[in-house]
Image (cartoon, helix red, strand yellow):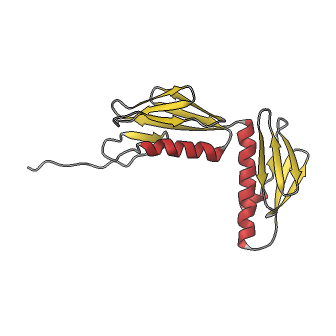
Amino acid sequence: MSRVGKKPISIPNTIQVSVEGSKIVFKGAKLTKELETYGRVGITHKENELAFSLNGENAQARAYWGTYRALANNIVVGLTEGFTKQLEINGVGYKAAVKGKVLELALGFSHPINYDIPEGVEISVDKNLVIIKGSDKQQIGQIAAEIREFRPPEPYKGKGVKYIDERIIRKAGKTSKK
C-alpha cells in the first residue's frame, strides 16, 4: 500500500481547488495550475482537504495513487511557498551574472554561456551562488540540472557547477616518483 497516497492534502485558504471530471484545477493568487489524472485515481474534495483513492487493486493503480497525490501536493506547495534550488560555482575566473532575462555564465570556456530564463522562474546571483526560484518543482529541478550540465564538478580540484548540498568525492591525482 502507498503510504504517500493515504495522506490527505490540506488546502490553505489562499488556494481554490475544483475537480472537473478527472482534472484538478488549483487557483492561487497569481497562477492557475491543472493536474490531469486521466481517471487513474479517485478524487475526493471536501472543504479544505483533497484525498485520493485507488482505482483497482493492481500494482500500477497503487503507483498512480501515490504519484498523483505527490504531484498535487507539489502544486499546492509551489503555489503557497514556491521551490528553490541553489547552485555553487567553484573555479578561478568562473562567474555568473543575470542580464535581463538571460543568465550569463563564464565557466572557463573561450565564450560566455547564455542561458535564457523561462517565464515563471526567477534566477538571482549572489557572489558564487546561483539561486533558482519558482512554483513548479519539476521545472526548477530541470533548470538546475541544465545549468549544472554546462560544467559539472570535476573530482581533482572540485571546479565546476554543483548543487549547494552536493558532496564531490575527490581523487588523489598524480604522485611523484621517488
The residue located at (85%, 45%) in the rendering is 17
| Quarter where residue 123 is shown | top right
| Quarter where residue 56 is shown | bottom right
The residue located at (84%, 51%) in the rendering is 50
User: Looking at this rendering, what residue extends furthest in the left direction?
Assistant: 178
Residue 157 against residue 64 in the figure, above or below: above
Where is the N terminus found, in terms of image quarters? bottom right
In-image side of 10 versus 132 (left or right): right
The residue located at (79%, 64%) in the rendering is 40
User: Looking at this rendering, what residue extends furthest in the bottom direction?
Assistant: 58
Residue 110 is situated, as x and y percent measured from the top left of the image, at 33, 35
Residue 33 is situated, as x and y percent measured from the top left of the image, at 77, 44
Residue 144 against residue 112 in the figure, above or below: below
Residue 22 is situated, as x and y percent measured from the top left of the image, at 84, 58
| Quarter where residue 14 is shown | top right
In-image side of 97 versus 56 (left or right): left
In-image side of 72 versus 42 (left or right): left
